Amino acid sequence: MPTNLPDLATQIQDISKRLGIGKYDIYGAAIDETSVQVDQGEPKQVKASNRSSVTVRVWNEEGTVGITSTTDVDPTGLELALKTAYEASFFGAKENVPDFSPEATAPIAVTPPEKAAPAPVAHLIDTLLRAEKDLLAAHPAIKSVPYNGLAQRDIDRFYLNSEGALRSEGHSISSIYLYSKTEQEGKKPRSAGAFRVSHNLEELDIAGCLRETAEKTISHLDYDKIPSGKYRVVLSPDAFISLLGAFSNLFNAQNILDHQSLSTPDSLGKAIASPLLSVADDALHPENVGGESFDGEGTPTRRVILIDQGVLSSFLHSAGTARRMQAQPTGHANIGAKVTVSRHFYHVFPGAPASQTYSLEEADNVILIDDLHALHAGVQALQGSFSLPFDGWLIRDGKRTSIESATVAGDFLQLLQSIIYVEPDLELTGGGISPRVWVDSLSITGE
């Protein structure tokens, strides 16, 4: 990545003048990553990578745009990219031509945290070996930690355009993943995992990750079959965020314009969920480690309320979708061969006050779903239906019994309407922050 962005912007201005290019923008990102894995007390894999990409867009006199990408950020590489994009612009689409974001030069108030110095690889390996050893010692039945990883990542991003937009930011992220597996005579292997993320290795909650993995794995040792039928279901924060992500076309303006969504432009303002539920997409949430302050078009990111007490209240926009739907860009654009729209970080929280509260300690014949599997295969995103294997427990009189194997199926929009309680306590997951969500009834197929 360029160390001095103003200098780079000046160089590009000079190059574009020389080439006769009047309108252009450039988005770049670089990721420097080191990750380690271990296996039975020995280092298994050490990976280091440095990936960078720069996307250059050029508009010609006819108003059509050409796009090219490069990994070179020196003046020679960028001159070639500008030239190529200009030549490509004459073959560009004539309809819905992307344009600069009207907010590409709007001020950004947030300051990202300081980047952390990377820890030595030997320290990463020692830390992960210690975590594996402690996890194997947590219970005699835990025989292996087949999936694990400790990673540190440095991310740098920038955006500039010919109208004077100039943005850059950098982040450091450290993360750990542990997934343990049991072996007991006459019993099926059981497994569970946990994940933690932080700005740096010092603040990473490795002990919490270890404890959660061990507790979940041990809780699955005494398992039982369950009869198929309709059950009241409690979705863990991770399970609920996973489902929201699987059906994110609900909020995605590009999907809606492409008729690849469960929503239409007229869905705004309609009740799609129980009034007990509210959902925001919040790139700048304090729990979002590595949250981005601007998107691929230079639009500042922000908190967007998607569902307000059950009512669909906003879509996620790029500059182009916002223009076509007479809305404001929301900072969700990814720039590439075409502009796409994607979410940042879900924040699920209680909406209207609940008339009745529920507690797992007093629950009876309720299923707690901890982790959903095979989302790539078991979700029909355009039909709204899902059928997914899961890990979880049957709760009888407050006592948990692990479920040997089962599948949950339903319709996502019906699920949203069937929510009877959104707990107040929030928990961080890989895709956002959410409480446990109680659903009145879902179809469960036991073995």
Image (spheres, rainbow, N blue to C red):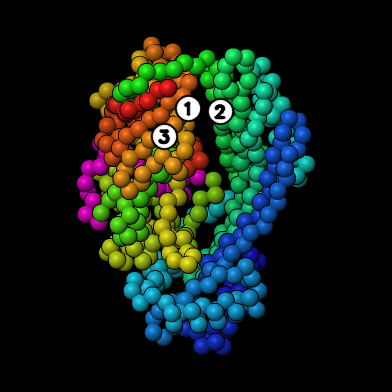
Mark 3, Cα crowd under 10 Å, few <14 / some 14-19 / many 20+, is many
Q: Secondary structure at mark 3?
A: strand
Instruction: Give the main secondary structure, helix, strand or loop, of the magenta stretch.
Output: loop
Task: Return the residue at label 3.
Answer: 388
Q: CA distance from mark 3 to mark 2?
A: 17 Å
Task: Return the residue at label 2.
Answer: 192
Q: Nearer the viewer, mark 1 or mark 3?
A: 3
Residue that appears at 44% across and 31% down: 389
Residue 391: mark in rendering: 1
* Amino acid carrying mark 3 in the image: Leu
Mark 2, Cα crowd under 10 Å, few <14 / some 14-19 / many 20+, is many
* Residue 309 seen in render: no
Specify whether 124 is left or right of 443. right
Specify whether 351 is left or right of 343. left
Point out the tag, 2 or 1, that comes first from the N-terminus: 2
Residue that appears at 36% across and 66% down: 320
Mark 2 in CB contact with mark 1 (< 8 angstroms): yes
Mark 1 in CB contact with mark 3 (< 8 angstroms): no
Image quarter of residue 318: bottom left
26 drawn magenta: no
* Amino acid carrying mark 2 in the image: Ala
Along the line of sight, the residue nearer the viewer: 43 or 203: 43
The range drawn in magenta is 265-288
